Image: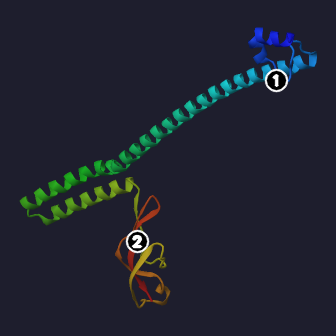
Amino acid sequence: MENKENLDENPASAAQQPDNLATDELTTDEAVVVGEADETAAGETKTSDATSRELAELKDKYLRLYADFENFRRRTAKEKLELISNANEGLLQALIPVVDDFERAMQSIDKTDDVTAVKEGVSLIYNKLFKTLETKGLKPMVSKGEPFNADLHESVTQFPAPSEDMKGKVIDEVEKGYYLNDKVIRFAKVIVGS
């Protein structure tokens, strides 16, 4: 009865005691078990709080990193589009003086009867244009007299070779081929000796 009265008088302590304990007095072993249970519960709460904080921090870092990556992707895509749209700017700026020379030549053709002066002017403009293109990496392909190469030449037709040593070689060039920085940008159209 005395135990029951103690339980009734102190209901808070009764709630903290394990169900198998009927008295307020605990042995040393029982006290250690109850203390460990309390520490474990407190430790689990601290651990879950720390874990949730760490999870929130990692989630925040992930979201920031993802946003930074998306901004980087958009910026590089925009820069790439600008680069593509302005890629020929340098070439066109270099060709504008050649266009100016052609306009002056066309005006002088109407005013003059001297054909040699017109030929000389057109030849100068051609040389200027060709040198401008060479500075930009354009290089003509030498095909005449070379062995036919399908990687460089496009055969238009075949004619009988004028000599035995010209068989399988380029006899004539219908259209000149060009390299741009050692890459073929136009194949040479050629006539091959058979």
Q: Check the image and report above or below for 31 versus 105.
A: above
Instruction: Identify the residue at image location x=70%, y=22%.
Output: 46
Image location of residue 5, percent across then percent down: 81, 10
Instruction: Identify the residue at image location x=24%, y=50%.
Output: 97
Circle number at residue 60: none
Judging depth in this view, the residue of 78 and 151 nearest the camera is 78
Q: Check the image and report above or below for 128 versus 30.
A: below
- The amino acid type found where label 1 is placed reads Asp
Which quadrant is the N terminus positioned in? top right
> Which one is earlier in the sequence, the residue at label 2 or at label 1?
1
The residue under label 1 is 19
Contact, mark 2 vs mark 1 (Cβ under 8 Å): no
What SS does tag 2 mark?
A: loop
The residue under label 2 is 187
> Is residue 70 found left or right of 23 in the rendered image?
left
Instruction: Identify the residue at image location x=36%, y=71%.
Output: 176
Q: CA distance from mark 2 to mark 1?
A: 95 Å
Q: Quadrant of residue 110?
A: bottom left
Q: Quadrant of residue 28?
A: top right
